[in-house]
Amino acid sequence: GSASRDRLRIAIQKSGRLAEPARSLLAACGLSWRESRDRLFCYGESLPVDLLLVRDDDIPGLIADGVCDLGIVGRNELDEQAAGRARIGLAPAYRELRGLGFGQCRLMLAVPEDWDWQGPRQLQGLRIATSYPAILAAWLERQGIQAQVVELSGSVEIAPRLGTADLICDLVSSGATLRANQLKPVETLLESEAVLAGPAQGFDDARAGLAQMLLRRMDGVLQLKD
Ligand code: ATP
Ligand code: ZN
């Protein structure tokens, strides 16, 4: 739980694919900030809404711990950490409030190009490299397949060539990285985009009204975009 506060704190990615579009969206909602010296914390000027600039991986945990009130993060990251919490018996700590229409990608299984893909049953007993072990394990369980999940934090796409896995489960947008590694996508586990995430339980202080106003403005901005 988080202590009572009268300012809203939003976590966004410091640098990377979601950093610029997240800031633009919040700016379009009428927020502005005083540039900070450390560039990790941006104090809100137009409204009592501050930014924390962090690694995307840290955003679900910051919301779970009540350090931040809202976050803009990929659904892939949010769902992975939720699935990870569920596996160790922890209650859901956050929820997706809005899909934001940028950062689209898919979490997919990809196999060597020369495989003749006949469906998930083919995966029985194989080794799958991924940075999304909890989502993959839950999917395998639903499919009734026993396979070995090889957790890698990066460069997942070279695992089949290195011989450390038979296939991979990774984020795909254009498919160029897969092609460059002689892999082809065969199954989609998750359709992802950037989302606005908030705590599973709402706020009971001034933050409730601020969050409500921000969501209303965001809905207006998102509507104008499509
Ligand atoms: P950080 O330093 O914050 O940990 P990162 O390297 O984990 O950065 P990015 O590569 O910037 O993260 O990706 C952030 C998010 O962008 C991903 O979690 C995903 O939701 C989205 N995304 C969209 N397309 C792709 C893609 N082709 N590959 C990876 N992520 C993508
Ligand atoms: Zn990351």
Image: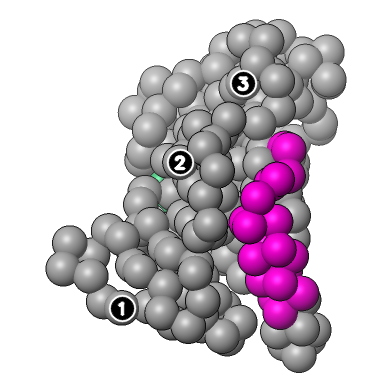
Spatial CA distance of label 1 from label 2 is: 20 Å
For label 2, the SS is loop
174 or 200, which lies in front? 200
Q: Amino acid at mark 1?
A: Arg
As for residue 134 lying within the magenta part, the answer is no
Lateral position of residue 108 relative to residue 38, left or right: right
Q: Which numbered disc, 1 or 2, marks the residue that appears first in the sequence?
A: 1
Q: Amino acid at mark 3?
A: Arg
Spatial CA distance of label 2 from label 3 is: 18 Å
For label 3, the SS is helix
Q: Residue furthest bottom?
A: 224
Q: Badge 2 is on which residue?
A: 67
As for residue 215 lying within the magenta part, the answer is yes
Can you tell which quarter of the image residue 220 is in?
bottom right
Q: Residues within 10 Å of mark 3 (few under 14, many from 20)?
A: some
Mark 2 or mark 3, whichever is nearer to me: 2
Q: x and y percent of residue 36 in the render?
A: 23, 70
Q: Badge 3 is on which residue?
A: 85
Q: x and y percent of residue 185 in the render?
A: 65, 47
Q: Are marks 2 and 3 in contact (CB under 8 Å)?
A: no
Residue for point 71% across, 79% down: 217
Q: Which numbered disc, 2 or 3, marks the residue that appears first in the sequence?
A: 2
Q: Amino acid at mark 2?
A: Val
Q: Badge 1 is on which residue?
A: 34
Residue for point 48% across, 19% down: 150
Residue for point 37% across, 49% down: 55
167 or 130, which lies in front? 130
Residue numbers of the magenta segment: 200-218
Looking at the rendering, in which quadrant would you find the C terminus? bottom right
Lateral position of residue 50 relative to residue 139, left or right: left
